[in-house]
Image: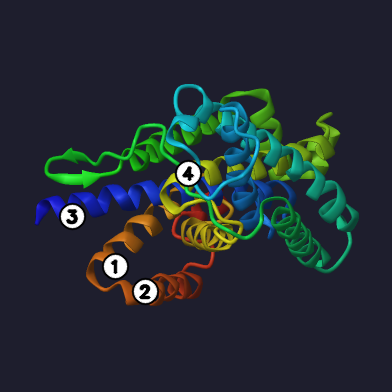
Amino acid sequence: MLDVYLQTLLSGLAVGGVYALIALGFSITFTTTKTLNFAQGEFISFGAFIGVTMLLLLSGLASTTTAVPSEAASAWRYPAAVIGAGAVAGFMGILIFLLAVKPFAGKGGMNWVMSTLGFGVMLQSLGLAIWGPAPVMVPSPLGDNVLRIAGAGVRPQELLVLACAILIMVALDLVMRRSRIGKAMMAVAHSPQTASLMGINVNLVMIGAFALSSGLAGVAGVLIAPIASASLFMGMGFALKAFSGAIIGGLNNPRGCIYGGFILGVLESGIGLWQAQWREIVVFGLIILVLAFRPAGLFGQAAVDKV
């Protein structure tokens, strides 16, 4: 029985790592610009298909297919696809900020909600025109043979997702806390007016926040594609769960969002082991309880105290 619990834990941590990456993206835009990108789900899906396209092109296959050959993800191709998808999604994040968020900056209301949602619809329609609605099976660069850890069966891609998620989040944490760019973003998050008086280009920092947030979503799409398969409809579910993790951890606390993503992944996996049909009820019931008793999130209060 112990092997089943270990397998559930590892699978939950892997999915939680994806949730944490996307939740971190939500936190970055919220703390820096006080807005959210509600097209984040489409960026996940788009990133997955950018990765699929790069794998096919780099392996000499120019046309899309329902299954990417295993050799297409071997060697350097998969890391190149991850980086490429992150770069393309980051560029599209700049576009959504300039076209759908900045025009409403400093104005009353929440027009940016509908504009980002509309951008997401346009992005999904563009994806359907390019790749079609059929999902694509993506191979893992580490193969599909199940690994045994203390008797628990784990797919290599789950370990890769977990390792990549942790490395990316640790690297971003170091950049945010020790580099000039990170300190500039924290200054803008604290007070854009004060940051501007200190000579920080607030507009450029906000553009960078959206690029980074969208880039994380694109990377997450490629990482999760070998587990969930690439689909233009896959992103909404992951984005919703990631946003839920951000709410649980504390949307104004980047580290809290990471913790919330992992908590949600493990909780979801554990409930699935017990009663899969209760998964959504328990998860969203937890969110309601957190909002009722800890509106800032489980770890959000610490961030509020610092302000």
Does dot 3 land on a helix, a strand or a loop? helix
Examine the image and state in which quarter residue 111 appears: bottom right
Quadrant that contains the N terminus: bottom left
Q: Earlier in the sequence, mark 1 or mark 3?
A: 3
C-alpha distance separating marks 4 and 2: 31 Å
Q: Earlier in the sequence, mark 1 or mark 4?
A: 4
Amino acid beneath label 2: Val
Does dot 1 land on a helix, a strand or a loop? helix
Q: Earlier in the sequence, mark 2 or mark 3?
A: 3
Q: Which mark is residue 169?
A: none
Residue at 84% of width from left, 39% of height from top? 203
Judging by the rendered image, the residue that carries numbered circle 1 is 271
Judging by the rendered image, the residue that carries numbered circle 2 is 282
Q: Earlier in the sequence, mark 2 or mark 1?
A: 1
C-alpha distance separating marks 4 and 3: 27 Å
In the displayed structure image, the side of residue 183 where residue 139 appears, left or right: left
Q: Which mark is residue 5?
A: 3
